[in-house]
Image: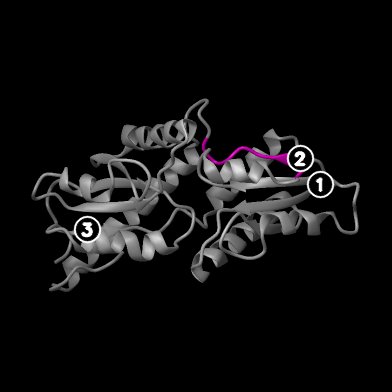
């Protein structure tokens, strides 16, 4: 099966990890609402873990003949993207495409740079990109690529530290950044989608300054993230439509 060429575009399912943090929940809800304001498709939010509705509930809430594109509101393509979401999509009797994770992307690098500017980054500051971490090597590599892109924008090397699962640990990355220049400030660029448990762990580290995550509760959702979500949706839907138009298939294709 493939996504049909029906008149109605496939629904956009914006699926985040989920969090018990009220601030994190609100920040993600604001992003989904901002996407819904400008999307041409129906937009619904859901979560991989912690919160409801979960992915099965969101998929079952669609009309029976509706196709869907799942856009992971995840910064790197780890286990949730490659395994959890694929498994849930395969369980339903409808056509579901799974888009790429949000990162790496230059627009997210620009948002990270803006957060550093808001924190008043100084010329002599050392910068560490704080990432959630994953056991999936592809997700880890995505984080190093984001550090490279951020470094190009802010004209300095950006090291990487992981809050869990991957190496080097954030605490080690902060400590290593102090070596050689003990008087320099170490600033943590928070490569996390929203406030929550991992953001709290990052704040517990011994950095001189920690930036806000990509999403905050105040103000509108960053336009960069809205654009990335819409582009991930459009790319996945277009690949499905192109496959359908050129080669009839007998099984679902992944975007």
Q: Is residue 11 left or right of residue 131?
A: left
Q: Is residue 204 above or below residue 249?
A: above
Residue 96 placement (x, y as % from top left): 22, 58
Residue 36: quarter of image:
top left
Residue located at (25% from left, 59% from top): 88
> Which part of the image, by quadrant, shows the C terminus?
bottom left
Asked if the stretch drawn in magenta spans residue 209, the answer is yes
Secondary structure under tag 2 reads: loop
- Magenta span covers which residues? 207-215
Q: Which residue is mark 3?
A: 96
- Label 2: few (<14), some (14–19) or many (≥20) C-alpha neighbours in 10 Å: many
> Which part of the image, by quadrant, shows the N terminus?
bottom left
Q: Are marks 1 and 2 in contact (CB under 8 Å)?
A: yes
Mark with earlier residue (1, 3):
3
Q: Is residue 146 left or right of residue 63?
A: right
Report the disc number at residue 166.
none
Disc 1 and disc 3: Cα gap in Å?
45 Å
Q: Which residue is mark 1?
A: 125
Q: Are marks 2 and 3 in contact (CB under 8 Å)?
A: no
Residue 40 placement (x, y as % from top left): 26, 40
Q: Is residue 244 above or below residue 6?
A: below
Residue located at (44% from left, 52% from top): 74
Residue 189 placement (x, y as % from top left): 66, 46
Mark with earlier residue (2, 3):
3
Asked if the stretch drawn in magenta spans residue 219, the answer is no
Magenta-drawn stretch, dominant element (helix, strand or loop): loop
């Amino acid at each position: 099966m493939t996504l049909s060429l029906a008149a109605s575009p496939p629904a956009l399912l914006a699926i985040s990890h989920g969090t018990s943090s009220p601030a994190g929940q609100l920040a993600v809800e604001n992003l989904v609402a901002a996407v819904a304001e400008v999307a041409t498709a129906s937009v619904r939010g859901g979560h991989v873990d912690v919160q409801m509705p979960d992915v099965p509930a969101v998929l079952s809430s669609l009309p029976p003949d509706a196709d869907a594109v799942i856009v992971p509101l995840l910064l790197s393509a780890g286990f949730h993207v490659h395994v959890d979401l694929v498994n849930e999509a395969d369980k339903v009797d409808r056509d579901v495409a799974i888009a790429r994770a949000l990162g790496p992307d230059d627009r997210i690098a620009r948002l990270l740079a803006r957060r550093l500017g808001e924190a008043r980054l100084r010329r002599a500051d050392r910068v560490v990109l704080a990432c959630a971490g994953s056991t999936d090597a592809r997700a880890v590599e995505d984080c190093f690529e984001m550090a490279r892109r951020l470094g190009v924008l802010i004209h300095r090397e950006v090291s990487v530290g992981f809050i869990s699962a991957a190496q080097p640990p954030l605490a080690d990355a902060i400590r290593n950044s102090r070596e050689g220049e003990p008087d320099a400030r170490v600033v943590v660029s928070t490569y996390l989608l929203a406030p929550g448990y991992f953001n709290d762990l990052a704040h517990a580290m011994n950095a001189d300054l920690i930036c806000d995550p990509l999403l905050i509760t105040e103000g509108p959702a960053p336009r960069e993230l809205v654009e990335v979500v819409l582009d991930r949706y459009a790319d996945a839907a277009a690949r499905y439509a192109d496959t359908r138009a050129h080669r009839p298939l007998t099984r679902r294709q992944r975007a």
